[in-house]
Every structure is written in C-alpha cells, then in structure tokens.
Image (cartoon, coloured by chain):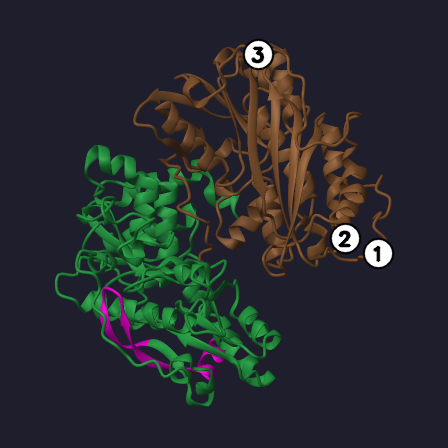
Chain colours: A brown, B green
C-alpha cells in the first residue's frame, strides 16, 4: 500500500532517539531488545505466557501439513499497491495455498540494512501485521539481523509458513490429466509492471498497482465446494509462461492456451508493448492457475469471479508428450510459449 | 488495446492471406529487413498463413545481431574499468564477447546498467561527476536520433564525463550489399518501417531501380506484415519494382526532418563492419569531429582489433538469409539462448532466438523449418 496502514500509530521508537536502524540494533544488546519490543512484539503480539523462547511451540492436529519458505528482495520496498511486508505474507500464504493447505503460522526473518529509516521499518511491519490478520495467519517466530550500509537493499525479509491440509486430494503437477481445463484467477502482469514503472522512473498515464493479495480464501472455497483440483500454481517470477512450462514438464503433458482469452489489463499491455516485454512472462503476486477436470470448470470459475471478474478459462491439457506449452496466437496460428531464458531484457527498438 | 488489437484481427489476417494466395502464381522469396518484423512473423505465426510458394527470408535488421564481436569486446573492456558506469540497452547485455559478456562483468563487480534512453546515461553522468559514464550506442537509424540528442545535450550541458561507444549502422547499404552478393535469393523487400519513419522512403528508390526489386515500407503488426507481403507479391507478379509505403500511418515520405537534422549535425557516414556481412562502405554512423570528446574509443584509447567470429556459429549465413536458423548444425544443440554461440540466438529480434523460442517443437519433430 502506498500509505501507512490506517491503524498504524507512529513509530514507537522515538524518531529523535534513533531515526535510523544502527548496526547495534542487531547486536544482541539493549538496543536490539528495544527494537524487538517496540517494533516486532508490538506489531505481531507478545510471546506466550510461558515466556519467550528460541522456538514457537504449535499444536497440530494429526494429518498432513504444508511447509514452505520464501525470501523477498523487492526494490523499492514500498511500491504502488503494496510493500515488501504485505508481499512477504501474501507470497508465503499463497505458496501454502497452492497445495490446498489452510495457512496457519508464519515465521518472519528480517535482514535490515544499517541506515534504514525506522519509520519505514515500522510501516512495513504494520503492513505485515495487517496482511497476516487478513489471511488468518499468525506470525509466531522470527529473527532480525542488521548488515552494514551498502550490503542490503534497505531490507530483505524471509517468511516460512506452515498450513494444515484438510482435503484428501493430491494437488500437484503429477496429477494434471489430459482433458483438464486450465483456469486463471485474474489478469496478468500487474505486479511486475508496477515495480518496473517505479523502478525505472517510467511515467505512465495512471498508475499500475501491484496485484499482491492472498488467494488462500479462494482456494479454500474451491475445496469446500468439492472442486476436484488437480494442480494449482501461483504466477510469480517468470509469470504464466514459466508456471505452465514447469507443470507441462513435470506432468509430461501438452498444455494448449489461447492468447485471446488470457486476461491482461490495457494499461499493463500498453506498458509491456512500450518496453518490449511479454505480459505472459511478467510476475504477479496474487494470481494462480488451476487445473481442474472439465466437469468442475464452470463451478470453479463461478467461485473465482466474485474475487476477480477477469478470471477465466484460458486453455486445456490436450495430450501427453511432448511436454510443451502451445499458444494459439491472436491471428490463429500456433507457437511454443517458452520460459524466459533469464531476466527479461527489453528490446532495443 | 487501441491501435494494436485492430492490427491483430484474426479474420482480417485470414482475408489478407486469401488475397495473397489469389495473386500468387509463382514462387517468390521476400526478405523482411527488420528484426522486429522477424519477431512478429515467428511469434504470431504469420508465415504459416502464407502460400507455400512464398518464402520469407529473415534479414539483418537486428541491431544486437549485426554488432561485431570486436565492439562487444570493446564494451566489455570499458565496462571492466574501475570507476566506470557502463550503460546499455538491455538486449546487448547477454551478447557473448570473445571471453565473457556484460552481465558477467556486472556479476564480477563492474557497474553495468540497463537504460531505456541514452539521455538517462547523460543524466547519470551529471549525477556522478567523479565517474566515467559510457553509453553503448547501437542500433539503426531508429535509435540514432536519441543517441545524437544525447551527444548534443552533453555538449550543451558541458558534461565532460560522458562518452559513447558508437556502432550505429545504416539499413540501405546493407540491403545493397545483400543484393550485390553473388547468388542473392532476395526478390523483394519489406523495408523496416521505423527506420523509414526517421529517414523517409527516398533513399530506397535508387535501390529498387538499380536491382529491379520491389521495396515495401512495412510496419510490425500481423496485418501490417501481411499487407506488406501482399503489396510486394503484387509488384513481383506484375513485374514492377517500386518503393511503396504500407506503413503510411507512421511513415511520411520525407521521414522526420527534425530527427534527420539531429543525426546530420552529430554524425557522419563511416564504413562499418557488420557481423556476418563483413565491412560495408558508408554503412555506419560515427561522431563528427566537433563531438569527438564524446567518443569512448578515442577517450579510452581502444585499438581496432580483428576478432574472428567463432567458426561453429553460422550466424553470418543466417543474417544474409542463406540459411534458416534450424539448418545450422549448432542450433538447439550447442547453441541455445542460455549458451549462445552468436548474437542472433541472444536478442529476441534475432532469427535464431525467435525460431528457438517459438518453433522448436516443429523443428525437432519435423526436422525442418523451411516453408
């Protein structure tokens, strides 16, 4: 979000005292205790009654759990539509959701660069707190390190998540079957273009905001409605193209999508055209694809649309081998949809 | 999206394809000059809509692809200098030099930055007065005006720590060089629309007349290219060899006067070596003497060296339209985008990369890509 969360009081570490993070804030002494008390415990809640300890102890019902970790290194740390804090919560919650798990707990580890404004840290931590509340997860353990000025990009965050699996499906690439319908939960490319436009100082008419958002509620709704989900994948780095290629390879299936059904907002499309980027390769932070049997496709779409009206069916798993993603182009011809080689590099002209 | 979707209409594309099939009675080989056109042809599958008797030959109009390895080596040498900020368009960063590439220089601690405009590099120089800021000025007539403007602004603002490694090239001399080569198969051209938006159409008239080839100034969207092919085939079938303008919504007959004057003021025409095509007289742009303070080659005393292209890379033949990318023995085997042997496998406008990205399945399963 581009403003501090409405519920955020001003930074509890007095600005006059320590307006910026010092190396000493990671030194294990009183300053670090002050940082933990006033910033982290104040936002994420106190330790249990038994007192603070080296590990959080959690009660889990018998059954399967999902466990995932991700590190967040976005620049700038506050961007249109979100910030590194909300993204670090949404991203890990969404990774859990992709296995059909109900997310419950997160860890949060911070690597702070010496000199980071305390007010910025507070804003990000409040944003994490609000995002966690929205997702129904608790941040139960964490860590803080401070590195020398110039050794970090303001701050890096790692979050690890645990969720419980309350269904009996095997939601994984290996479950994708010939004939499956391929659904997308919303329009593509907004996060990547929001970041690119501010990072490169590009001024587009109107601002593109990141799509950073949790998708776990929607996945739980799909499961509750009895949709036989075969596979889910969130469309982060590498975008739709990378996600589908990974699944095609793992499932040994050929996935065919139709370009004219792939939802891309007009401003995102225009920005991509200007920069020579392909929206199919651009990252999202609140979108996923679902592979479901044909019989459940309409039901699943009906559940997706109230969350994002641009959700739609974009393709089908047509046959096994060779494992490729084929895109029917706007003019009706077919081609491979490949993974980008590395970072997308804008064309010269 | 307005101004885009209407040029990607599937129904109209099929209608153009039908018209092309109707007027075609013989086999014709047409070269699209610009890499942007090649990219669109392969990405949208435009050639799949054409009759089998029409062959599209992919031309040398990819600035990344035609920049010789000597210049990549010079760029790497400058970027490796301590205290230098080396600025480049994104596409050039992955192109292999003799030993390394610019991304590897960056990973090794060099300050290599991707910019969208040469003017960003001038601003960087102003913001970093204690550093040498060097811009890698590549491209055809399309990017030359922005480079010229950067030199002009740097001169006006008295920016002493800015310079440019200039490898600008010109399209018409390359077309002539291809036509003059023995065994040239090209019978008609789709000229590069955006080059003509700057330069106009007049310089193509003598080429069309001398070599008896139709030249159709063409845009980059699927319907542009199909209409360009239709106009070119009509000329070929009727025995005409004229310059026509398909891309009239962008290209004025005289081009952009302001941009041309800027190029004239800053640059002079010089001989230039092209990857794959060799040295071509009067085919490049170099800085005029009054702007030589911004010439990075002079500033850093980089000597000209003759560096052979790797022998297993046949990109020279691909750039001349004599070989389809997939006919190269290295294609998809020792040469892939992650480990390119030559520039055409690097740039998204390069014919090899376009075939690899979009056509690999047909090539591996049918073992041919020839139309």
Disc 3 to disc 1, C-alpha distance:
48 Å
Mark closer to the chain start, 1 or 2? 1
- The residue furthest bottom is B290
- Residue at the spot x=56%, y=45% of the render? A269
- Residue at the spot x=18%, y=69% of the render? B180
Please determine if labels 3 and 1 lie on a single subunit: yes
Q: Tags 1 and 2 in contact by the CB under 8 Å rule?
A: yes
Label 2 element class: helix
Give x and y (percent) for residue B1.
Answer: 57, 44
Mark closer to the chain start, 3 or 2? 3
**In this rendering, is residue A189 above or below B341?**
above
**In this rendering, is residue B234 above or below B129?**
above
Mark closer to the chain start, 3 or 1? 1
Apparent side of residue A204 relative to residue B161 in the rendered image (left or right) = right
- Span highlighted in magenta in the image: B260-283
**In this rendering, is residue B273 above or below A41?**
below
Q: Which residue is mark 3?
A: A63
**Residue B140: which numbered mark, if any?**
none
Q: Which residue is mark 2?
A: A118
Q: Which residue is mark 1?
A: A15
Residue A212 can be seen in this image = no
Disc 1 to disc 2, C-alpha distance:
7 Å
Give x and y (percent) for residue A29.
Answer: 74, 49
């Amino acid at each position: 979000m581009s403003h501090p969360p409405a519920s955020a009081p001003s930074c509890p570490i007095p600005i006059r005292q320590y307006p910026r993070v010092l190396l000493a804030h990671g030194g294990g002494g009183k300053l670090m205790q002050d940082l933990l008390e006033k910033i982290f415990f104040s936002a994420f809640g106190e330790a249990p009654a038994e007192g603070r300890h080296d590990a959080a102890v959690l009660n889990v019902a018998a059954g399967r759990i999902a466990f995932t970790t991700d590190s967040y290194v976005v620049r700038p740390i506050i961007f249109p539509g979100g910030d590194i804090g909300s993204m670090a919560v949404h991203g890990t919650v969404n990774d859990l959701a992709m296995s059909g798990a109900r997310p419950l707990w997160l860890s949060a580890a911070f690597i702070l660069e010496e000199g980071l404004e305390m007010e910025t840290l507070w804003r990000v931590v409040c944003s994490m707190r609000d995002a966690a509340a929205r997702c129904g997860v608790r941040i139960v353990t964490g860590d803080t390190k401070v590195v020398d000025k110039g050794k970090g990009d303001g701050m890096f965050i790692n979050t690890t998540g645990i969720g419980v699996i309350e269904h009996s499906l095997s939601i994984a690439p290996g479950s994708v079957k010939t004939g499956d319908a391929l659904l997308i939960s919303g329009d593509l490319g907004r996060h990547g273009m929001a970041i690119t436009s501010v990072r490169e100082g590009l001024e587009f008419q109107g601002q593109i905001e990141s799509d950073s958002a949790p998708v776990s509620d929607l996945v739980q709704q799909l499961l509750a409605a009895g949709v036989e989900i075969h596979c889910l994948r969130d469309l982060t780095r590498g975008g739709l193209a990378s996600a589908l290629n990974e699944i095609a390879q793992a499932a040994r299936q050929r996935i065919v999508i139709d370009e004219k059904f792939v939802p891309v907002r007009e401003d995102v499309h225009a920005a991509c055209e200007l920069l020579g980027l392909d929206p199919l390769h651009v990252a999202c932070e609140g979108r996923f694809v679902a592979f479901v049997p044909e019989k459940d496709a309409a039901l699943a779409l009906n559940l997706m649309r109230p969350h994002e009206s641009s959700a739609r069916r974009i393709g089908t798993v047509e046959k096994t081998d060779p494992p490729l993603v084929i895109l029917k182009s706007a003019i009706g011809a077919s081609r491979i949809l490949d993974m980008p080689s590395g970072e997308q590099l804008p064309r010269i002209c | 999206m307005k101004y885009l979707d209407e040029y990607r209409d599937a129904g109209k594309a099929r209608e153009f394809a039908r018209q092309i099939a109707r007027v075609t009675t013989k086999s014709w080989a047409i070269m699209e000059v610009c890499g942007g056109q090649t990219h669109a042809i392969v990405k949208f599958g435009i050639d799949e809509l054409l009759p089998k008797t029409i062959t599209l030959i992919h031309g040398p109009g990819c600035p990344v692809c035609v920049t010789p390895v000597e210049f990549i080596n010079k760029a790497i040498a400058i970027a490796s200098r301590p205290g230098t900020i080396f600025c480049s368009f994104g596409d050039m960063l992955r192109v292999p030099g003799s030993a390394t590439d610019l991304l590897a220089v960056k990973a090794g601690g060099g300050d290599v930055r991707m910019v969208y405009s040469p003017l960003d590099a001038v601003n960087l120089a102003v913001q970093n007065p204690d550093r040498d800021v060097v811009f890698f000025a590549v491209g055809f007539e399309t990017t030359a005006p922005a480079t010229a403007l950067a030199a002009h602004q740097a001169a006006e603002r008295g920016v002493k720590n800015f310079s440019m490694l200039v490898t600008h090239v010109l399209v018409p001399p390359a077309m002539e060089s291809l036509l003059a080569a023995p065994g040239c198969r090209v019978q008609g051209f789709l000229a590069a629309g955006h080059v003509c938006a700057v330069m106009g159409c007049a310089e193509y008239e003598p080429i069309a007349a001398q070599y008896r080839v139709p030249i159709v100034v063409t845009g980059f969207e699927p319907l542009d290219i199909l209409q360009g092919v239709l106009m070119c085939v009509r000329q070929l079938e009727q025995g005409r060899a004229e310059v026509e303008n398909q891309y009239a919504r962008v290209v004025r007959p005289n081009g952009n006067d302001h941009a041309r004057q800027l190029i004239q003021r800053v640059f002079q025409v010089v001989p230039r070596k092209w990857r794959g095509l060799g040295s071509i007289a009067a085919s490049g742009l170099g800085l005029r003497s009054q702007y030589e303070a911004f010439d990075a080659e002079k500033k850093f005393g980089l000597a000209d060296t003759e560096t052979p292209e790797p022998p297993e890379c046949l990109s020279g033949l691909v750039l001349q339209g004599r070989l389809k990318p997939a006919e190269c023995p290295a294609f998809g085997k020792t040469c892939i985008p992650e480990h390119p042997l030559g520039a055409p496998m690097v740039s998204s406008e390069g014919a090899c990369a376009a075939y690899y990205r979009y056509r690999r399945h047909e090539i591996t399963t049918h073992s041919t890509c020839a139309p």
